[in-house]
Image: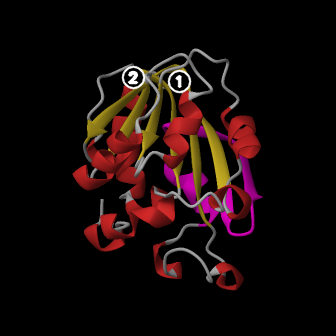
């Protein structure tokens, strides 16, 4: 991850603001985008304080890996008392510390702009099982929407994200969500030599 783009632990209280469910991504929207059967193993990439991790954990009986680069964020999540199926993983999303074929679904909620983008995709692809799905929700690159979130130069358009995912993932949905965000839902591609 690019250090200058990281959300700082001293601002962690902002991540726990329940207003995020109205302004950013609501629980019903999250459940719809993830479309879980209920038994998948999931990786929350850049889980922060676990605000969305814990919500995902209630949607599956599988393991939910809270992957976070900053130990301070994982400590805050531990203090909150996460659901029993959550496992904390200290590591960089750009060098994903999960074994091959260990997850069915990955999600990145308002953290993709902190990664190296395309260079992250191979490692994520390898960590996913065949048929795996990826959900990316992040800030739109739209000057009218810059009142919240990171500076525009760190943001992507949903079309750019779809391009960055190829050839490892095939985009199934790309749409605007909430007032400021976009969502891209993609499926793990079947590569001939994977």
At x 39% / y 22%, what residue is drawn?
A: 194
What's drawn in magenta, residue-wise? Answer: 157-182
Q: Which mark is residue 190?
A: 1
In the depicted structure, whether residue 2 falls above or below residue 142: above
86 on left or right of 137:
left
155 on left or right of 75:
right
Give the image location of residue 86, x and y in percent. 41, 28
Mark 2 is surrounded, within 10 Å at the Cα level, by few (under 14), some (14 to 19) or many (20 or more) other residues, namely few
Q: Quadrant of residue 6?
A: bottom left
Instruction: Between residue 107 and residue 84, name the one nearer to us.
Output: 84
Q: Quadrant of the N terminus?
A: bottom left
Give the image location of residue 3, x and y in percent. 26, 68
Q: Are marks 1 and 2 in contact (CB under 8 Å)?
A: yes
Q: Which mark is residue 153?
A: none
At x 73% / y 59%, what residue is drawn?
A: 22
In the depicted structure, whether residue 133 falls above or below residue 158: above
- Report the number of numbered marks: 2
The residue at which mark 2 appears reads as 194
Q: Quadrant of residue 140?
A: bottom right
Give the image location of residue 166, x and y in percent. 53, 44
Instruction: Between residue 44 and residue 125, name the one nearer to us.
Output: 44
In the depicted structure, whether residue 27 falls above or below residue 161: above
Mark 1 is surrounded, within 10 Å at the Cα level, by few (under 14), some (14 to 19) or many (20 or more) other residues, namely few
Secondary structure beneath disc 1? loop
Query: Can residue 188 be seen?
Result: no
At x 39% / y 19%, what residue is drawn?
A: 101
């Amino acid at each position: 991850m690019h250090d200058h783009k990281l959300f700082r632990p001293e601002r962690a209280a902002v991540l726990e603001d329940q207003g995020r469910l109205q302004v950013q991504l609501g629980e019903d929207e999250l459940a719809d985008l993830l479309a879980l059967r209920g038994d998948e193993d999931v990786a929350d990439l850049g889980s922060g304080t676990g605000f969305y991790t814990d919500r995902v954990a209630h949607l599956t009986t599988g393991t939910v890996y809270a992957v976070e680069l900053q130990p301070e964020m994982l400590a805050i999540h531990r203090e909150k008392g996460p659901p029993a199926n959550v496992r904390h993983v200290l590591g960089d999303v750009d060098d994903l510390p999960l074994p091959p074929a260990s997850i069915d679904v990955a999600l990145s909620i308002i953290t993709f702009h902190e990664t190296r983008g395309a260079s992250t995709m191979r490692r994520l692809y390898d960590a996913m099982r065949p048929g795996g799905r990826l959900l990316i929700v992040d800030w739109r690159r739209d000057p009218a929407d810059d009142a919240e979130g990171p500076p525009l130069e760190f943001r992507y358009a949903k079309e750019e994200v779809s391009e960055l995912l190829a050839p490892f993932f095939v985009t199934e949905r790309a749409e605007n969500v909430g007032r400021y965000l976009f969502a891209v839902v993609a499926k793990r591609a079947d590569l001939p030599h994977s």
